[in-house]
Amino acid sequence: MCTRPGPLGNPWRVVRSGKQWLVVWPEGKRDRYPTQAMATRMALHTFRMWLRYPMARARFRVATRGAKYLACWCPLGSPCHVDVILQEVFGDG
């Protein structure tokens, strides 16, 4: 499973804070957004940019070695970090 806190989870978390949505960075920085959709898009964009670094890609290649399937809890059709992993790490899509 590609969930947090496992090695395949997106380190950028989206959480609700009152009427705002936050993207919480691995080091604790917090970016605020008015909607969940905006926060999710930014979390996925940041994750995508991070995966373009060779060491980050290597981490995910090692973590998925021997895996036949990558799955998560996102509803079908919604933005998902597994799609980003498949595109950026394995060139699928």
Image: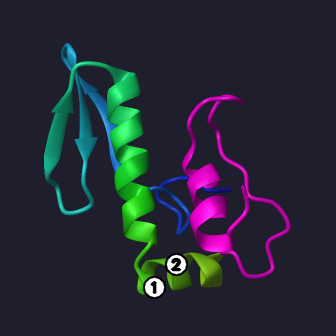
**Amino acid type of the residue that numbered disc 1 sits on in the rendered structure:** Pro
Q: Mark 1 packing: few (<14 Cα in 10 Å), some, or many (20+)?
A: few
Would you say the residues marked 1 and 2 are in contact, meaning their CB atoms lie under 8 Å apart?
A: yes
Q: Mark 2 packing: few (<14 Cα in 10 Å), some, or many (20+)?
A: some
Cα distance between the residues tagged 1 and 2 = 5 Å
Magenta segment range? 64-93
The residue singled out by tag 2 in the image is 57
The image shows residue 62 at horizontal and vertical percentages of 62, 84
The residue singled out by tag 1 in the image is 54
Q: Is residue 43 above or below residue 74?
A: below
Would residue 34 be found to the left or right of residue 12 on screen? Answer: left
Is 82 a magenta residue? Answer: yes
Would residue 29 be found to the left or right of residue 64 on screen? Answer: left
Q: Residue at image x 63%, y 61%?
A: 87
Q: Residue at image x 34%, y 54%?
A: 46
Q: Residue at image x 43%, y 47%?
A: 44
